[in-house]
Image: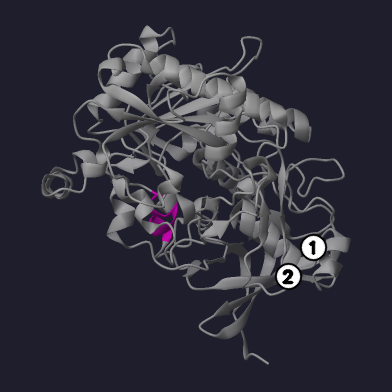
Amino acid sequence: MAEVATSAEFDVVVVGAGSAGSALAGRLSEDPSLKVLILEAGGSDDVLEVQIPAALYKLWRTRRDWNYTTEPQPGLGGRRLFWPRGKMLGGSSSFNAMIYIRGAAADYDEWAKLTGDPSWSYEHVLPLFKRMEDNARGADEFHGVGGPLRVEDLRSPHRWSRAVVQAAVAAGYPRNDDFNGARQEGVGFYQVTQKRGRRWSAADAYLKPAIDRPNLTVLTGAQVTRVLVEGGRATGVEYRRGGTLHVARAASEVVLSGGAINSPQLLLLSGIGPAAHLREVGVDVVHDLPGVGLGLQDHPLVPVIWHVRGGKSLFRAESPSGYAQWFGARRGPLTSNLAESGLFTRSREDLAEPDLQFHFLPVKFWRQAEVDPDVDAFTAAAVLVDVHSRGSVRLRSADPTWAPAIDAGYLTDERDLDALVCGIEKAREIAQAAPLASVLADEWSPGGTVQGREPLRTKVRETLESLYHPVSSCRMGTDDLAVVDPTLTVHGLEGLRIADASVMPTLVRGNTNAPTILIAERAADLITGRTVDPALTAHR
């Protein structure tokens, strides 16, 4: 038997100090009457690879990464895909591509419809986005200043990124200088969560400014193994730290912010989930909740890669001059987020909203950065953002140290395959337009000789990768398979909420970090009873 040490009682216990958990704990601790504990399984984010934007993939597959791998995917010929998830303060916001995208307004209106709660509509979440933001461009009807999350334009964009924007405009796509403004569709540069050329994670934004508050306790190296439930109410959590099993009691509530993999895993380990599956793996059923772990979605991408006629790609960013620029003025190629420019468009003209997003990288991005780039190259990553396929998260064992079984469900719906084929065709169309055409040489992948729908469908299955945006495994809603209600409270239990990407009813059209922080902002308001400043509600 492991030694058990009981911690002091808290009002709110937050599990996970990633994007959502950092934001939630920071906001909750603004109320001095609330005693808040946040538990993070990983450790510190105080390493140079976190701060230098272009080094983002250097921490993948290290101890600061959960280092997940999917189950073999039938739609991908049995391939398994690597899924990095941050295991440190800031979570995945400490090694993501820092792209600040909210998604389309229609995404939130759909959430409101699916949950039956208008407070999730775009009109109602826009003030929260504005409240959390400190945009370098200043305040307007879509953006805020003075919030914790710094949002800036890239300081030293690569000339090829400028060329691709110009080429897409020449190919007939509208220019869009603000994907988070009046409309999403079009081509332009991404804004990033950086502050003067260094990464600005959720931990930088929310947790570190709050770290000295007497009512906030932050514990790293603390892996939560079980939510404690007594009489239909969550009363605390059990966690392992330094070889000792601890118990932390929550007088008010427990909030899971572990993300789309760890939150459903923890519910299942706690006996909360589909009864038949729990019995199968030897977990006592505490609360039969059929939807836990179902409905998993992710954004799939297909990389289209060209060799270049000349010039230096970002794989040469780690040079003496690159480091000198970054350490000196926080400028130069190391300030890049790699995916500098982007495009939102539709695979079919009859679609009401974009279903494709492109990330254009002035570097070869192949096999999920498992090997460093070997040549100067350019990548157009065609990403499907309106995903029809669904997967699941399941336990392999009742042992909390075992990674769960992740079935991403890629291409289980044929509509996803057809849209990605269209994405390759659109990338090729842009590559042929000036001035990008003068930069690019031969197409390396899928390869210029691969033409026609069927050969391209085969290539999609062979080369599809993840954009690392898992959501919806603890979906919000009111139907029988919903896990939380519109207030983020777990159905059928008291004192237990989930605030992270797992509750999204559907994937947003775009990168998921900003929407995940939004959910934490909303959770903080729900827990404290705070309402949004009316000044942020009206369009200015």
Counting from the top left corner in percent of width and height, residue 127 is at 54, 31
Q: Relative to 310, does residue 89 appear above or below in the rendering?
A: below
Is disc 2 surrounded by few (<14), some (14 to 19) or many (20+) residues within 10 Å?
many
Task: Name the amino acid type tagged 2.
Answer: Thr
Q: Identify the residue at image location x=67%, y=40%.
A: 75
Quadrant containing the N terminus in the rendered view? bottom right
- In this figure, which residue is indicated by the disc labeled 2? 235
Q: Is residue 361 left or right of residue 71?
A: left
Is most of the magenta stretch helix, strand or loop?
helix
- In this figure, which residue is indicated by the disc labeled 1? 272
Return the mark for residue 234: none
Say which of 98 and 521 sits in front. 98
Q: Relative to 77, does residue 51 appear above or below in the rendering?
A: below
The residues colored magenta run 201-210
Task: Name the amino acid type tagged 1.
Answer: Ile
Q: Identify the residue at image location x=30%, y=52%.
A: 51
Q: Identify the residue at image location x=61%, y=81%.
A: 246
